[in-house]
Amino acid sequence: MTDKLASQDPGDVLSAGADKFTVDGLDFFYGAFNALSGIDVRIKEHAVTAFIGPSGCGKSTFLRCLNRMNDLIPGTRCEGKVRLDGHDVYGPGVDPADLRRRVGMIFQQPNPFPMTIYDNVAYGPRLHGMRKRADLDAVVEESLKRANVWKEVKDILGRGGLTLSGGQQQRLCIARVLAVEPEVLLMDEPCSAIDPTSVQKVEDLMAELKDRITIVIVTHNMQQAARVSDYTAFFLQELAGEAAHLIEFDRTATLFTTPRDRRTEDYITGRFG
Amino acid sequence: MREGFRQELKELKAEVVSIGRRCVEQTVLSVRSLVEGDPDLAATVVAGDDEVDQRTLAVEEHALEVMATQFPVARDLRLLHSLTYIAWHLERMGDLAVNIANSARRTASRRGPQTLSDLIQAQGNLVHRVLEACLEALEKNDLDLARKLPDLDEPIDHLYKQFFRELARLQDEEDIEWASSMIVAARCLERIADNAVDIGERMQYMLTGTFEATGESAER
């Protein structure tokens, strides 16, 4: 395993800025299958980190390890340490629901609740005890603005969330997550099912949000990773049936101009995968 | 799509090497026109520069188009970026060969001391050697050879200094204008070689991803 990670130098790459997540020696299993092995990585606070790699390389699996979404899949288990602000997210006494409020998630397919646009966004704050209409109004407006969709929906807040276009639905889902003030936003291919205009708006909002939120995005679109992220991690499963590894982690500009590992170079230049 | 892209990169690089060969030819002919006092040959060199200019411009335009449409990264990006720079250096070499040819036109009917003519020819031969090595390194992605270019350039700089020592020995009755044209030509040859060394440095970045500045820049 050492040689798999020989190309990265986390100490060098990650010497600047605070770490939001620190992951050490993470292994992940679906039943007996070791899907991810030996993952060591630091996710920088207030930065966008992109995970790239071919299908089946474990990048989405790893993303879900960060807020324990894999706990919902029977037969899975995780070894190693995942720390959020220095605290073990798999430690005793950690409430996964509270963790997922702090570490929100956006999925490939937009999944608004079957309720009004307003209620979609107000859902989380209400769940956490916010009752006053004026407070809720303010949170709804602020969240929809931050999600870059306010102008399109401000006059139709009472309409069903599912009546919106796919791209608008995705930004509504982002607003819903932002309404509970998460510290981290995990985005699992958030743009692969939406129109180009909405893609642009989602990419813009990522740049705006990172001043206050740490963002981790899984994307198949390498140009998108290059455009939106500050750091990029390349995952690879070299042989079918074997565990995937983190091959290289670096500043995005460095990884896309002078990758250190030949496998990264071959992947990003389209020579395999 | 990627196969077509890779073919485009290959063709672009082959074109840059081919322009390089044309620049070698221009340089060699310009030196010959000067040493032999041949104004017709000098005129041929001057006329030939348009082709070099047009082809280097086409390389730059093509590289930009490929960058805009293919989103190259890593070694592909470095190759395209470097080829653009290399084309620019070749265009400069072409201009310097024209300067030498213009010196030849100005001095065609006059003769000066043979020692200076011999020095120009010797310097031309050394520059020819650097240019050939530069193009071979580029064509074969030969990093070791690219790193040797500053060493090959060194005797040219020495010869350039010797040129001035010979000039100092000129007697009053010698043709000063002729000698001045020789100085211009010697300086141009020295700068052609510097451009070749710069190309070698660009190649090092292209092949390794790090800049390893070694020799004197042609633009200093």
Image (spheres, coloured by chain):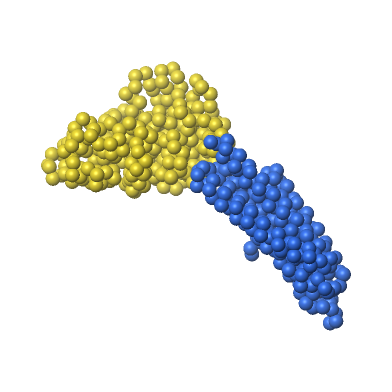
- Residue most toward the bottom? B172
Q: Viewed as shown, does residue A180 lie left or right of A24?
A: left
Q: Viewed as shown, does residue B136 lie left or right of A85?
A: right
Which quarter shows the C terminus of chain B?
A: bottom right
Question: From where the camera sits, is residue B154 visible?
Answer: no
**Which chain does the yellow colour mark?**
A
Residue nearest the observer in this picture, B220 or A213: B220
Residue nearest the observer in this picture, A193 or A234: A193
Answer above or below: position of A97 versus B18.
above
- Residue most toward the right? B114
Q: Position of residue B184 (x, y in %)?
A: 73, 70
Answer above or below: position of A2 versus A258.
above
Q: Colour of chain B?
A: blue
State which quadrant residue A140 falls in: top left
At 37% from the left edge and 37% from the top edge, which residue is drawn? Answer: A191
Residue nearest the observer in this picture, A244 or B149: B149
Q: Position of residue A68 (x, y in %)?
A: 34, 29
Q: Position of residue A134 (x, y in %)?
A: 13, 45
Q: Position of residue A216 (x, y in %)?
A: 38, 38
At 41% from the left edge and 47% from the top edge, which residue is drawn? Answer: A17
At 72% from the left edge and 52% from the top edge, which residue is drawn? Answer: B21
Q: Viewed as shown, does residue A246 lie left or right of B164?
A: left
Question: From where the camera sits, is residue B15 visible?
Answer: yes
At 67% from the left edge and 57% from the top edge, which residue is drawn? Answer: B51
